[in-house]
């Protein structure tokens, strides 16, 4: 397959991990942050499982394009697509769910009921129906195509269940559920069937190039601030250079290397994780004085040497020059 937008670790997860690194281990919000990370990682791992089956698919790679994790404009808001696959005859939108337990689809009332056993008791959770979700994504994507003057082709959509420990059941309209809901193990078989019923080629290679450039240009990552979500005070965020071995903040610059005074770990680039933390938690630019404060460096010249050695793009005058941190995107 030709992947035009790779599946990457979600920015929300990266920001949550950065926040967790910067809090004391006994902080009261750590359990909630761990729970959020676990939930987000479950979704990410479910989506990644699709890549395995697509890689095994014998269909010619040159004949379809794959885009993962899209967030596109629609009117005054945005809509998200887990995976979009473009063929010359049609496009396919995949809504991925990594959920365990009993999954009861009830399209008549636009809901999904998840049932799990906890302490020998049935616990039910209610969610919007994924079938309705993916159908809405298709409607919005067609509007997006029209707005960008891209020829319309047939659209298809599927809900893919990636957790093999789940049990799928239709409460209402079983035919609709059967048409839209599949497991990841049969994804390529369903795609074969969709190809058989969509044979008229409408999109040319030129159309694909235009769609690709427009999708990548208009894709807008979600803006998310975990510090605000978990109501963390500025003074609760630890400063210093993070040690990947003991997970403390006792790494110090000593000549050409970084040494942890707590566990004696030695590295040439241990500071990069802390610079990424700053990018994820605060902003995409940094000044020399901001780096000195965040890294807890004794000398301003040390901070200056670090930023200059990275050869970053910058703007502004010497005293308040802003260095751009694009390599963490």
Image (tube, rainbow, N blue to C red):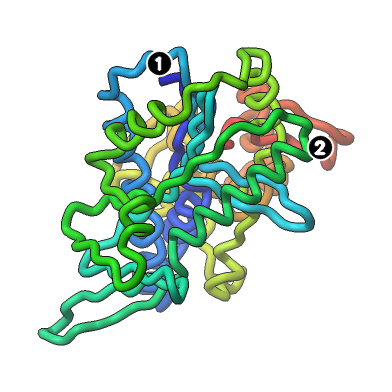
The answer to whether residue 246 is seen in the rendering is no
Q: Quadrant of the N terminus?
A: top left
Image coordinates of residue 4 in percent, x first then y, are: 53, 25
Q: Quadrant of the C terminus?
A: top right
**Location of mark 2 (residue):** 321
Vertical arrangement, residue 160 with respect to residue 76, above or below: above
Q: Is residue 65 left or right of residue 54?
A: right
Vertical arrangement, residue 284 with respect to residue 255, above or below: below
Vertical arrangement, residue 282 with respect to residue 50, above or below: below
In the picture as drawn, the residue positioned furthest to the right comes out as 317
**Location of mark 1 (residue):** 61
Image coordinates of residue 267 in percent, x first then y, are: 38, 31
Q: Is residue 115 left or right of residue 286?
A: left
Sequence-first tag of 1 and 2:
1
Q: Is residue 316 left or right of residue 49?
A: right
- In what element is the residue under mark 1? helix
The answer to whether residue 54 is seen in the rendering is yes
Q: Residue at x 47, y 22 (%)?
A: 199
Q: Quadrant of residue 244?
A: top left
Q: Residue at x 38, y 58 (%)?
A: 176
Q: Is residue 286 left or right of residue 249?
A: right
Tally of marks = 2
Q: Residue at x 45, y 36 (%)?
A: 7
In the foreground, 237 or 177: 177
Q: CA distance from mark 1 to mark 2?
A: 46 Å
Q: Nearer the viewer, mark 1 or mark 2?
A: 1
């Amino acid at each position: 397959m030709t992947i035009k937008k790779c599946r990457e670790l979600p920015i929300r997860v990266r920001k949550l991990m950065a926040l967790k690194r910067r809090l004391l281990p006994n902080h009261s919000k750590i359990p909630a942050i761990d729970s959020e990370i676990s939930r987000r990682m479950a979704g990410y791992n479910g989506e990644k499982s699709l890549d395995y089956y697509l890689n095994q698919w014998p269909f010619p790679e040159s004949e379809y394009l794959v885009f993962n994790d899209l967030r596109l404009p629609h009117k005054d808001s945005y809509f998200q697509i887990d995976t979009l696959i473009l063929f010359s005859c049609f496009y396919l939108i995949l809504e991925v769910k990594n959920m365990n337990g009993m999954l009861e689809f009830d399209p008549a009332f636009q809901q999904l009921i998840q049932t799990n056993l906890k302490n020998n008791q049935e616990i039910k959770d209610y969610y919007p129906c994924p079938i309705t979700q993916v159908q809405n994504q298709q409607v919005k994507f067609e509007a997006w195509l029209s707005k960008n003057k891209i020829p319309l082709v047939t659209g298809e959509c599927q809900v893919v269940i990636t957790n093999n420990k789940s049990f799928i059941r239709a409460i209402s309209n079983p035919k609709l559920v059967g048409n839209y809901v599949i497991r990841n193990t049969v994804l390529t078989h369903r795609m074969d069937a969709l190809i058989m019923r969509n044979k008229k080629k409408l999109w040319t290679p030129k159309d694909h190039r235009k769609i690709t450039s427009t999708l990548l240009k208009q894709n807008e990552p979600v803006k998310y601030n975990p510090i605000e979500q978990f109501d963390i005070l500025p003074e609760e965020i630890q400063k210093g250079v993070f040690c990947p071995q003991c997970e403390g903040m006792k790494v110090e610059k000593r000549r050409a290397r970084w040494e942890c005074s707590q566990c004696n770990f030695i590295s040439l680039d241990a500071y990069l994780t802390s610079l990424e933390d700053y990018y994820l938690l605060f902003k995409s630019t940094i000044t020399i004085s901001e780096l000195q404060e965040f890294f807890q460096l004794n000398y301003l010249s040390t901070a200056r040497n670090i930023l200059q050695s990275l050869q970053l793009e910058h703007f502004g005058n010497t005293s308040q020059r802003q260095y751009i941190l694009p390599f963490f995107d």
